[in-house]
Image: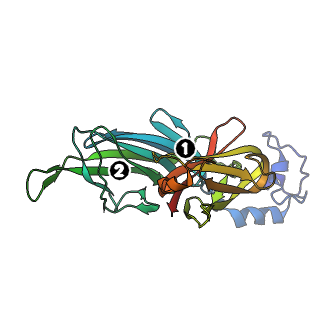
Amino acid sequence: ISGCFNKSVSTILSNGISCKGADTNGDGVIDQRDVDCVKSQFGKIIPTPTPSNPTTPNELMYTYTISSTSGAFKLSPNVAHPNKSGTSYNCISRFNTNCDFYAVLLGINNTDQNLYDTTFWTDPDNSLLQYAWNGKWYKTKLVTNEVSSASHEAFNTSVQIIPPAQIGNYTNTFYVDAKTCNTYTNPQNCIYYGGSSFTVHLTVSLSSNISVQIPTSTPAFVIASTPTLMAQGPSISPSQINITARFNDYDILSNNTVTLTLSYPGTHKLSVVGEETDSLYPPVTVLTEFQNNYDNVATVTDSAQVTVYFAYPAGHPPFTDLYQFVGTHQGIVQFKDSNNSVILSVPFNLNVTR
């Protein structure tokens, strides 16, 4: 500053230095105030801004991988949700919305003799898996009075996993066993044959669909961009149908209707179908319709009411054989998009009484 004192900001000294840089306070005049400005700032460090943490993506990938072992029973799963590819099933979601796992599990007697007291259980302390029996969900051990003959169907149950919103790995196993008995002893000598298992391994990870810009620590501070959220997927209420219907005095199945509320932001062409998935015969008929057009196909904007009717086939069986329908019927109601891909599934347990 000393060489430029009281000179114009356009002055260039003999050593080639421009006096423009000496105007430290920017008022166009090089004077004592510029000297004071330098003195007040001398030795101070202007910190570089520290960027905040980038926004965490809130889309997660849920990958289910299934396997089974055979003992007393051979297990055959029919996975209804999510969409499948071999033994691996993927679902992308904001947190855990609509990424639950649902399958119908068929058990075949894998022995050459009768099996008694079919018994189910899971690992209740650390398993996310629950199984259905007679219209109720269980995690704890359940001993039934079911008897199955050699090489025949023994049971048909549903298994479900409602996943967490935390990243990690989760192993969930359903077990089943039954007893073989020596009927020639008194009392009968019965022992468990050896269990079968159905395992669902779940991996929760960040979805690769979201790209997050991580800022660098530079003087030109860059603010982390906010990830673009995907449109919210469909949801249904209730998510499980449990209903008891009975034949009244006129042999008509009463209390046989359930209303579902579908929420799906945007406009979508959907269809809804229902079917019984167990082995009870004769099966009940499952009728479905969107209430806005009384059809099972509709263009839905944001939300819709859906009615599910349970009935027996007209003219079958004769009224004297209605007892054949008594029992718990299990199945599923599925919503499909215009490509006929399942986007949502609602399991049902229909208990028919006389």
Colour scheme of the rendered structure: rainbow
The numbered mark at residue 82 is: 1
Q: Is residue 233 visible?
A: no
Which residue is drawn at the image coordinates 69% and 57% (left, top)? 307
Q: Which of the image's four quarters has the N terminus?
A: bottom right
Graded by Cα atoms within 10 Å as few (under 14), some (14 to 19) or many (20 or more), the crowding at tag 1 reads: many
User: Can you give x and y, in whole percent of width and height, for residue 186 in the image?
Assistant: 8, 58
Residue labelled with disc 2: 173
> Which amino acid is tagged 1?
Pro
| Pointer 2 or 1: first along the chain | 1
Graded by Cα atoms within 10 Å as few (under 14), some (14 to 19) or many (20 or more), the crowding at tag 2 reads: many
SS type, badge 1: loop
- Decide if residue 60 is on the left or right side of residue 157: right
Which residue is drawn at the image coordinates 28% and 45% (left, top)? 196
Which residue is drawn at the image coordinates 40% and 46% (left, top)? 200
User: Can you give x and y, in whole percent of width and height, for residue 338 in the image?
Assistant: 72, 37
Q: Residue furthest left?
A: 185
User: Can you give x and y, in whole percent of width and height, for residue 231 in the image?
Assistant: 71, 49
Q: Examine the rendered structure and indicate whether residue 6 appears above or below residue 267.
A: below
SS type, badge 2: strand
Query: Residue 226 or 166: which is nearer the viewer?
Result: 166
Number of marks in picture: 2
> Which amino acid is tagged 2?
Thr
Q: Examine the rendered structure and indicate whether residue 253 appears above or below residue 210.
A: below
